[in-house]
Image (cartoon, rainbow, N blue to C red):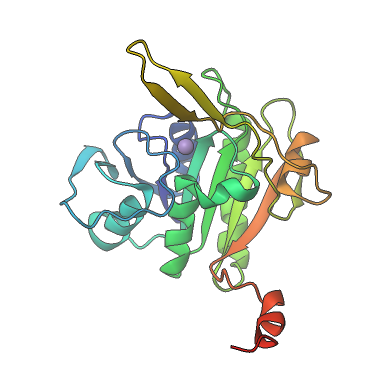
């Protein structure tokens, strides 16, 4: 197996190191990751300034760009192999429900899927500094091997979330859940009397929808959500076609 590993928490994050180390046991691994935290940059691609990649180890590159930049540079320039799979993470914090649209972790997997390479995004549902990524990394190795063996449906990648702690219960195939958005802006005044606003996303507050990603990890299961590139709402086409334009 040949594997490209990236993330959005930066190349020194504990999650990417746990993932790369576990994968090294069974595969040829290259790491191309942002040089600093780039969480919530979504699918941003850097077009208006050049990118630098610093080789920080054998098959290991730190890039001053986004996760999407890293996948592009890795595949098209830096790597001396074509990966069988791209894995992103393990993210510090969950990527559930609507949050997948903000996630740099998920976007890296999306970018690989655009290139026709199977991909998985991994996230651990805790922001704790002392989080233990080892159980999640072990499962990631098994899942990567399964994806390489079985392939994925066309234009589809997997968004995997792990519960914060405890023994991981069996993986469930889930749907993308729904976040509650109330009360997420902190509105305060700074020491110089000017208002400031801070968008808060740290709390795990989702609707507990049966079969959803959130419902699975809330109950201690690993959540595996198949996502795809086509954002068309196929259900609405008949309705819109009934309009008179
Ligand atoms: Mn992140």
Q: Nearer the viewer, residue 114 or 141?
A: 114
Total number of numbered labels? 0
Can the viewer see residue 13 in this picture? yes
**Is residue 116 rendered to the left or right of residue 140?**
left
**Is residue 101 rendered to the left or right of residue 10?**
right
Check the image and report above or below for 45 versus 181.
Answer: below
Check the image and report above or below for 240 versus 88.
Answer: below
Q: Nearer the viewer, residue 15 or 218?
A: 218
Quadrant that contains the C terminus: bottom right
In the displayed orientation, state which residue is furthest to the top: 191
Q: Which quarter of the picture shows residue 189?
A: top left
Check the image and report above or below for 75 versus 96.
Answer: below
Q: Nearer the viewer, residue 2 or 175?
A: 175
Question: Percent x, y for residue 236?
Answer: 69, 76
**Is residue 145 rendered to the left or right of residue 12?**
right
Question: Percent x, y for residue 13?
Answer: 42, 29
Q: Which quarter of the picture shows residue 203?
A: top right
Give me the residue at 15% from left, 51% from top. Answer: 50
Question: Percent x, y for residue 235?
Answer: 71, 75
Question: Percent x, y for residue 183?
Answer: 63, 31
Give me the residue at 59% from left, 73% from top. Answer: 232
In the displayed orientation, state which residue is furthest to the right: 210
Can the viewer see residue 220 in this picture? no
Q: Nearer the viewer, residue 216 or 188?
A: 188
Give me the residue at 58% from left, 43% from top. Answer: 95
């Amino acid at each position: 197996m040949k594997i490209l590993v990236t993330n959005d928490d930066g190349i020194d994050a504990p999650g990417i190191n746990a993932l790369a180390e576990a994968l090294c046991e069974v595969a040829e691994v290259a790491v191309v990751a942002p040089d600093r935290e780039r969480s919530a940059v979504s699918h941003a691609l850097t077009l208006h300034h050049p990118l630098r990649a610093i080789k920080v180890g054998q098959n290991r590159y730190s890039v001053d760009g986004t996760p999407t930049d890293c996948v592009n540079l890795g595949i098209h320039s830096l790597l001396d192999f074509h990966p069988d799979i791209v894995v992103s993470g393990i993210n510090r914090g969950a990527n559930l429900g609507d949050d997948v649209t903000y996630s740099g972790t998920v976007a890296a997997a999306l970018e690989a899927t655009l290139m026709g390479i199977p991909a998985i995004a991994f996230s651990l549902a805790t922001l704790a500094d002392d989080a233990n990524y080892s159980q999640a990394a072990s499962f990631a190795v098994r899942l990567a091997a399964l994806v390489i063996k079985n392939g994925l449906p066309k234009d589809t990648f997997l968004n995997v979330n792990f519960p914060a702690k405890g023994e991981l219960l069996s993986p469930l195939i889930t749907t993308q859940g729904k976040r509650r958005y109330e009360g997420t802006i902190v509105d305060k005044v700074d020491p110089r009397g000017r208002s400031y606003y801070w968008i808060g996303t740290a709390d795990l507050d989702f609707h507990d929808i049966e079969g959803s990603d959130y419902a699975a990890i809330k109950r201690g299961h690993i959540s595996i959500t198949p996502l795809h590139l086509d954002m068309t709402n196929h259900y609405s086409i008949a309705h819109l076609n009934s309009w008179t334009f």
